[in-house]
Amino acid sequence: MYMKSWSSCCCPLAEGGFNIKEILSWNKANLCKWLWRLLHPTDSLWALWHTHYNLQHSQLWTAPISSHHSESWRSILSVRDSLLKLYGNCLAADKILQQCSTSAGHFLVCKMYDCLRPKFPIVRWAKTVWTAQALPKHSFITALAAQTKLATVDNLCKRGMYLVNWCVLCKQAGESHHHLFFKCPFSNSVWRGILGWMSLPGRSSTLRQELLWCALRTKRKHWKACWFGCCLTATVYTIWQERNARIFSGKELSVPTLLHQIKFHVAVKILDSKHSKEVLDHLTLIYA
């Protein structure tokens, strides 16, 4: 169970979403294509037929919706009403439709969809989390953790579930995203072990601070940024899996075992990428 709304999932990766198409907005964007054809008829027999038989002497922006109309025609007029409500008047709505078309007379549904979908603030950590070198499941869990949307005990308590707020990893404090990544002594030991493997100084910081540190100091395409992003997402995923295993299965793994798992996942991905030579040379240099 994850604490993220569907609308926030249906937005680009740069806005903290998962690049899922929001089907209602996508359907409206496709209907806008037919609306645009009616407003800018060329040699379309379909547009001429609807103009003659459905509109007759009415204007498209003011034509009433009748129960005698076909379902497709009612849908087109319904999206027209949605545009009028969204942009205020027919001039503004028509301007948006024109902006979503090309000079060659083609309507861009994807551009219209971008105008209709819900918008969210840009997140600075997206390029660090969603790197090609990281496993998708690692990036997915890390993206949720960065937005505090995992089902931690404090989140469950906020939603009315009566649970003992206790961290199963360190058994010293309550469980929250801030504590779990990486203020918890157990998870902090795991992260310090990975930082040592990358030959980076150990530090006591949170997940969001680590994400911002990588976003500010490294370039996306540089192999060190890819390596750091891959290690960070693998660490977050492994800690979350260990937390779930202790709660639901009663199984516990030690810090060295978790470090071995993380290094294995990272090695499989990184050494199979175009940055494999640089990583191997770096590991040879620091561990020679």
Image: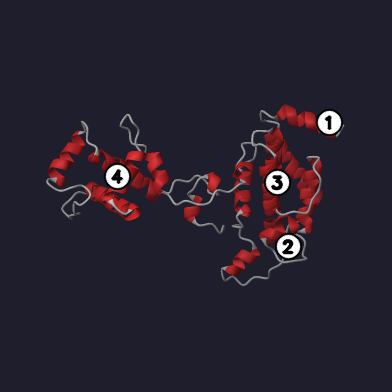
The CA span between labels 2 and 4 is: 57 Å
What SS does tag 1 mark?
Answer: helix
Mark drawn on residue 168: 2
Q: What residue type is labelled 4?
A: Asp
Residue 260: image x %, image y %? Answer: 77, 43
The single residue placed furthest to the front in the displayed view is 91
Q: In the rendered image, which quarter is residue 95 located in?
A: top left
The CA span between labels 2 and 3 is: 28 Å
Camera-nearest label, 4 or 3: 4
Q: Name the residue under label 3.
A: 213
Count neighbours of disc 4 (C-alpha within 10 A) and say few if under 14, some if 14 to 19, many if 20 or more.
Answer: some
Q: Which amino acid does label 1 sit on?
A: Leu
Q: Do the residues labelled 1 and 3 touch (CB within 8 Å)?
A: no
The CA span between labels 1 and 3 is: 24 Å
Q: Which numbered disc flags the more N-terminal residue, 4 or 1?
A: 4
Q: Which amino acid does label 3 sit on?
A: Trp
